[in-house]
Image: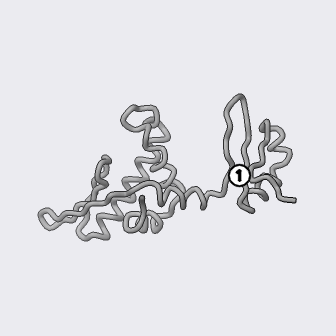
């Protein structure tokens, strides 16, 4: 007999009571939902979510050289960094993204020109610096 692919908990209390089962199910690749006051949330492994964002969010990195400095920017997004080398500029871009993710969570997420950056912020928060550097090179749609 096959198990359902989604396990639904109608309240956070029932999910809390079965928390080990929630984590065991997600480890086996099953979707788990938890309802609370009309809001339904999904519990899933962070690495799977990060992998999805790695593919779904395009970095669109552009590099340029100006006055002996390397400029790195994310085309269509307000991120520009520089360094004396390509690696330095990209490492500075990672730092800019980390600072932005903190600002976004603290105050920017409701601003009309920032609210659509949720997926980018989640990718940044779920990734190591090396993973973000890899995303610059190979990530996106």
For disc 1, the marked residue is 31
Q: Quadrant of the N terminus?
A: bottom right
Q: How is the image coloured?
A: one colour
127 vs 96, nearest the viewer: 127
64 vs 93, nearest the viewer: 64
Q: Quadrant of the C terminus?
A: bottom left
Residue ID at (21%, 65%): 70
34 vs 70, nearest the viewer: 34
Left or right relative to 138: residue 35: right
For label 1, the SS is strand
Tell me residue 80's x, y (percent): 28, 53
Tell me residue 10's x, y (percent): 79, 37
Q: Is residue 11 above or below residue 45?
A: above
Residue ID at (67%, 53%): 44
Residue 16 position by quadrant = top right
Residue 66 position by quadrant = bottom left
Categorize mark 1 by other alpha carbons within 10 Å: few (<14), some (14-19), many (20+).
Answer: some
Q: Is residue 79 above or below residue 138?
A: above
Tell me residue 84's x, y (percent): 23, 68
Residue ID at (38%, 64%): 136
Left or right relative to 39: residue 95: left
Tell me residue 3's x, y (percent): 82, 56
Q: Is residue 8 above or below residue 86?
A: above
Residue ID at (49%, 54%): 123
């Amino acid at each position: 007999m096959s198990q359902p692919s989604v396990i639904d908990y109608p309240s956070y209390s029932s999910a809390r009571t079965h928390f080990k089962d929630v984590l065991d199910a997600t480890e086996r690749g099953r979707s788990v939902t938890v309802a609370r006051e009309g809001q339904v949330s999904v519990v899933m492994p962070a690495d799977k979510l990060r992998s999805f964002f790695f593919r779904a969010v395009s970095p669109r990195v552009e590099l340029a050289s100006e006055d002996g400095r390397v400029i790195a920017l994310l085309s269509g997004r307000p991120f520009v960094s520089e360094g004396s080398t390509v690696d330095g500029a990209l490492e500075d871009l990672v730092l800019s993204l980390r600072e932005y993710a903190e600002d976004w969570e603290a105050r920017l997420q409701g601003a009309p020109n920032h609210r659509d950056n949720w997926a980018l912020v989640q990718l940044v928060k779920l990734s190591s610096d090396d993973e973000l550097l890899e995303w610059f090179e190979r990530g996106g749609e």
